[in-house]
Amino acid sequence: MARNLDPKCRQCRREGEKLFLKAEKCFTDKCSVERRAYAPGQHGQKSGQRLSGFGTQLREKQKIRRIYGILERQFRRTFATAEGRKGQTGENLLQLLEARLDTVAYRMGFGGSRAESRQLVRHNGVLVNGKRVNIPSYSVRPGDVVQMTESSLAQLRTKAAVEAAESRGFPEWVEVDAKAGKGVFKAYPQRSELPATINEGLVVELYSR
């Protein structure tokens, strides 16, 4: 399976904000964005550079791709699906990305990051409605029950991830029983429930060119 192998902290610095790709490290003062709030590379500290309209749109698309950990071809397919649905394409896009099994597992605290949750899914550690699903891009539907297998729940790493997520609180669109390592995907999230730092409208403009 193809994946982005760029160092995660460099990805955050390139976008100029926390993308929460490194689990608990992102919540500490060890976060590279906190320590070096400029783009990586020898020209990273240069200021005053302005992006064109196209550059701004492209940068936003790259940021969203990095947040959800997907590559270009898969992102285009998801966008095409969002475009074919009723409603606003941008909001549909974010809802489809949030409904991916790896992201749902992350929102429920099964992994400290989306990458950890994706690995858990790939290693047969997650059940959907009682059936084992090992496809990270699997689309979870409202009402689906997502849970960890007994062996996954017994791991210290997943226990720590669930406890950390529980202490921060879970999103409104999932209902989680932390002790049982089990949750329900109640509904697709509303746009107001998702980060305001994401500007999906720029992606819609980019693909409308």
Image (cartoon, grey):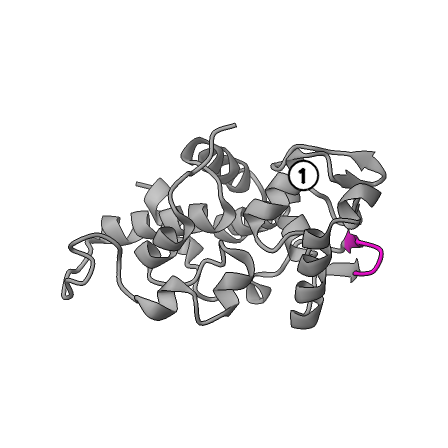
Question: Pointer 1: residues within 10 angstroms few (<14), some, or many (20+)?
Answer: many
Identify the element where label 1 is drawn.
helix
Q: Nearer the viewer, residue 193 or 109?
A: 109
Does residue 32 appear left or right of residue 85 in this picture? left
Whether residue 149 is visible, yes or no, is no
Please provide percent x and percent y for residue 175: 77, 60
Looking at this rendering, what residue extends furthest in the top direction? 1
> For mark 1, what is the residue?
121
The picture quadrant where one finds residue 34 is bottom left
Identity of the residue drawn at 57% across and 53% down:
113
28 horizontally vs 190: left or right = left
Give the image location of residue 162, x and y in percent. 71, 59
Magenta stretch: includes residue 45: no
Type of amino acid under label 1: Val
In the displayed structure, does residue 54 sit left or right of residue 46? right
Task: State the residue at coordinates (73%, 57%).
Answer: 159
Task: Residue 6 in the image: state x and y as whole percent.
Answer: 38, 42
Q: What segment is highlighted magenta in the picture?
A: 178-184
Q: Is residue 165 above or below residue 82?
A: below
Residue 90 % position (x, y):
48, 51
Q: Nearer the viewer, residue 166 or 159?
A: 159
